[in-house]
Amino acid sequence: MSFLATVLTLYPDMFPGPLGLSMAGRGLQDGLWSLAAHDIRTHATDRHASVDDTPAGGGPGMVMKPDVLARAIDAASAANDPRPRLLMSPRGRPLTQAYVRELAAGSGVVIVCGRFEGVDERVIEARNLIEVSVGDYVLSGGEPAALVLLDAIVRLLPGIMGNDASGNEESFEHGLLEHPQYTRPRQWEGREIPPVLLSGDHAAIARWKRQQSENLTEQRRPDLIRPKDWKK
Ligand code: SAH
């Protein structure tokens, strides 16, 4: 069974979007994964096909209605669907490579994309939505966040990446940022490739890479070395 991504959105035309090209797109064509984007609006029932309403207690913007969204979720994913149901949300669990790996090891994901001010809290509770954030900034909708999440998952699926080893050496895979990379020409604008990388001494190269990774991580992202756990 290949990995199945179901996306619930008000903008199904945004999918597969960039995931239809390059590695992910080839994987989609070859059936290594599949994607179903469902339009939440088809589950609206009133004359205007409303999917949102004004926030209880006042305040700006609109909130996605729980009844319409729940119908969309129930139509796309049966009660016994083993796939986790995720809601893209800036309040969510920060997306990490470890969580991406966990999701990529499963049978798929159901992803709800919010719009407006977000979704009615009751549908999050009633449908066990796991809120996931792609970073500490606010997007206008969950769709770009879903594309980010799916891109990170899909590249890990079996058969997608040409050189499978490359997935294990990347930033975050060992809790560290990646060392600097170089390629030919050996000298460019007066800058040399670090001589150790041309030495052929594999142990020395491995030590250099490790040291560079540790230094970079300490400088730029000390939080990766001393992580805080995500508390719901
Ligand atoms: N009022 C909300 C923001 C709503 S933004 C708040 O202050 O928390 C509209 C939608 O965009 C959200 O429902 C969510 O689906 C998506 N979104 C925005 N920023 C995001 C982020 N950093 N990560 C994941 N999804 C995000």
Image (cartoon, rainbow, N blue to C red):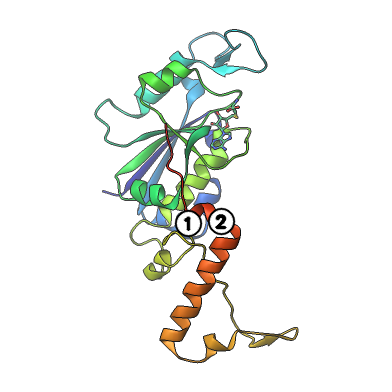
Q: Is residue 116 above or below residue 58?
A: below
Snapshot quadrant of residue 158: bottom left
For this orientation, the residue located farthest to the right is 189
Image location of residue 83, percent across then percent down: 31, 37
172 lies left or right of 107:
right
The residue sitting at 52% across, 44% down in the picture is 147
Image mark for residue 225 = 1
- Mark 1 Cα-neighbour bin, 10 Å: few <14, some 14–19, many ≥20: few
Q: Nearer the viewer, residue 117 or 196?
A: 196
Does any portion of residue 170 appear in the rendered image?
yes
Quadrant position of the C terminus in the picture = top left
Q: Are marks 1 and 2 in contact (CB under 8 Å)?
A: yes
Could you tell me the amino acid type at mark 1? Ile
Amino acid type indicated by mark 2: Arg
For label 2, the residue is 221
Q: Within 10 Å of the Cα at label 2, are there few (<14), some (14-19), or many (20+) other Cα atoms?
A: some
Left or right: 190 in relation to 34? right
* Residue nearest the observer in this picture, 195 or 215: 215
Q: How many numbered markers are drawn?
A: 2
- Mark drawn on residue 184: none
Determine if the C-beta at disc 1 is less than 8 A from ligand 1: no
| Residue 134: x %, y % from top left | 53, 42
The residue sitting at 62% across, 35% down in the picture is 138
User: Is 96 left, or right, of 190 in this rendering?
Assistant: left
